[in-house]
């Protein structure tokens, strides 16, 4: 996981692509972020709508084939992830901000939860709108570098 020192608790919103990637590969930066969540070093922020999106995306046949989790194992992962999450109530919506309507709930959770960063593999999808709200957008790799330095 690297030899860097972790400073403080990071409050992050992870895009669903980060969860997918983290479950598909045990060696990548996304998986390392999920392990830091499990260890309590990262506090993921999540709204109800975003959590339902995680469940829907991770349950897609193409993703289940890749991550290899059966229905019970997937529910166990989601329950474990949820237990580490800080719930976010979405009081303000600024739609539409993004080209993909499914990304709106990710941005809303990050802004309403006052996240330290929104972590995604799709920086271009979020950067313009996130900047308007003063929100950092980082790739999993860049977030790990920040956490471990």
Image: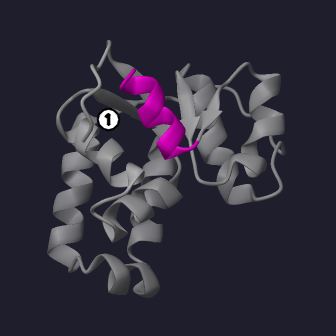
Residue found at the far top of this picture = 8
Quadrant where the N terminus lies? top left
Residue at image coords 52%, 21% = 116
Q: Which residue is mark 1?
A: 85
Residue 146, x across and y down, in percent: 47, 25
Main SS of residues in magenta: helix
Residue found at the far front of this picture = 3
Q: Quadrant of residue 90?
A: top right
**Element class at badge 1:** loop
Q: Quadrant of residue 40?
A: top left
Judge whether residue 41 can be spotted in this image: yes
Residue 134, x across and y down, in percent: 73, 18
Q: Is residue 15 left or right of residue 104?
A: left
Q: Is residue 49 magenta?
A: no
Residue at image coords 25%, 81% = 68
Alpha-carbon neighbours of circle 1 within 10 Å: few (<14), some, or many (≥20)?
many
Residue 114, x across and y down, in percent: 56, 19
Residues 109 and 42: in front is 42
Q: Tell me the magenta residue range.
A: 139-149
Q: Is residue 15 left or right of residue 94?
A: left
Residues 33 and 84: in front is 33
Residues 12 and 143: in front is 143
Residue at image coords 19%, 48% = 80
């Amino acid at each position: 996981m690297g030899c860097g020192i972790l400073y403080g608790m990071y409050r992050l919103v992870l895009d669903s692509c980060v969860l997918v990637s983290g479950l598909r590969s045990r060696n990548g930066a996304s998986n390392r972020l999920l392990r830091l969540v499990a260890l309590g070093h990262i506090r993921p922020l999540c709204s109800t709508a975003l959590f339902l999106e995680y469940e829907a995306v991770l349950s897609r046949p193409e993703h289940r084939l890749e991550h290899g989790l059966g229905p019970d194992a997937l529910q166990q992962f989601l329950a474990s992830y949820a237990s580490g999450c800080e719930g976010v109530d979405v009081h303000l919506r600024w739609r539409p901000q993004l080209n993909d309507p499914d990304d709106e709930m990710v941005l809303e959770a990050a802004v309403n939860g006052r996240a330290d960063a929104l972590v995604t593999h799709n920086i271009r999808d979020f950067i313009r709108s996130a900047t308007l709200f003063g929100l950092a957008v980082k790739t999993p790799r860049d977030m790990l570098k920040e956490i471990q330095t």
